[in-house]
């Protein structure tokens, strides 16, 4: 009679299958994009959030000239701001984050926006754009409805559109260059229709080149706020021959983000007056 010998592989197959599944799972874990795991919470973005990671730091500016005016920008990261300390140090203007997308309002907005005004500063509000969530016009409405408006009081600056690297995913929010230009135009058009003012555009030259194709069509109407942590503002996006504001560091005194207005205080007042 033939002898039936046990097949050792038959008993090992479930074990081998389990090991293969474990190895595959580990491989997928190690090779999967880290964006989802490392992306910050929605609402936490702020002016210049991507500057150091993408453009780095290249020196610091020289002592401000008499024709430049010191400013700061703040968001919920700074909490309640010591505005009197900043005023005493020479800061004369400030921007506060009001909104992001159509899902976030800054819980510290009142203390920051009104607090800067109360110590004598000229103040404004900014909106962190998320072009992958809703239209430009929809976000402009949300911004205006939640602190981003403008009043002719001589001390309120026009709202700023913060358009820069996407901290939550793809650099250009999944948009082509032409689609990004269209989204920005939609926001700017609605903001002007709601407030009568042309919004300031905050951006970095490298992002603007990558994501709009270095579009120059907004320069004639919209003031430029350039982001560059270096000894000078560097090459500007197409169309703008000068910057209106320059965010030059994220490690300044008291609040971190410090800026320079390209002009004396009377020019800051002129922008506020429209």
Image (spheres, rainbow, N blue to C red):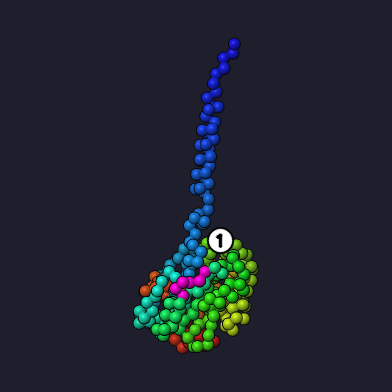
**Between 61 and 139, the one nearer to me in the picture:** 139
Res. 235 in view: no
- The N terminus sits in image quarter: top right
Indicate the position of residue 102 as horizontal and vertical percent values.
56, 69
Residue 4 sits above or below residue 17 on the image? above
x 49%, y 48%: residue:
30
x 53%, y 53%: residue:
33
x 58%, y 72%: residue:
139
Residue identifier under label 1: 170
Indicate the position of residue 126 as horizontal and vertical percent values.
51, 75
Span shown in magenta: 104-109
Asked if residue 38 lies in the magenta stretch, the reply is no
Q: Badge 1: how crowded within 10 Å, few (<14), some, or many (20+)?
A: few
Task: Using the rendered view, name the quadrant where residue 213 is placed.
Answer: bottom right
Count of residue discs: 1
Indicate the position of residue 217 as horizontal and vertical percent values.
61, 76
């Amino acid at each position: 009679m033939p002898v039936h010998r046990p097949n050792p592989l038959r008993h090992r197959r479930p074990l081998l299958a389990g090991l293969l599944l474990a190895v595959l799972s580990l491989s997928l874990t190690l090779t999967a994009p880290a964006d989802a795991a490392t992306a910050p919470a929605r609402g936490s973005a702020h002016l210049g959030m991507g500057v150091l990671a993408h453009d780095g730091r290249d020196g610091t500016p020289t002592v401000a000239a008499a024709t430049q005016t010191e400013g700061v920008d703040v968001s919920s990261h700074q909490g309640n701001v010591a505005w009197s300390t900043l005023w005493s140090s020479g800061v004369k203007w400030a921007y506060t984050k009001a909104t992001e997308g159509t899902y976030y309002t800054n819980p510290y907005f009142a203390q920051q926006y009104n607090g800067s005004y109360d110590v004598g500063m000229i103040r404004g509000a900014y909106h962190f754009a998320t072009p992958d969530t809703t239209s430009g016009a929809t976000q402009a409405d949300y911004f205006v409805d939640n602190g981003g408006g403008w009043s002719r009081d001589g001390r309120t600056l026009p709202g700023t559109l913060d358009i820069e690297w996407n901290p939550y995913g793809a650099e250009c929010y999944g948009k082509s260059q032409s689609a990004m230009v269209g989204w920005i135009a939609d926001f700017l058009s609605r903001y002007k229709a709601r407030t009568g003012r042309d919004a300031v555009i905050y951006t970095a030259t490298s992002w603007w080149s990558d994501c709009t194709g270095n579009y120059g069509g907004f320069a004639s109407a919209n003031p430029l706020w350039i982001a560059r942590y270096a000894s000078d503002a560097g090459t500007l996006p197409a169309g703008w021959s000068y910057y209106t504001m320059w965010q030059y560091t994220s490690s300044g005194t008291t609040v971190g983000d410090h800026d320079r207005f390209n002009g004396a205080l009377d020019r800051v007042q002129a922008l506020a007056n429209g």
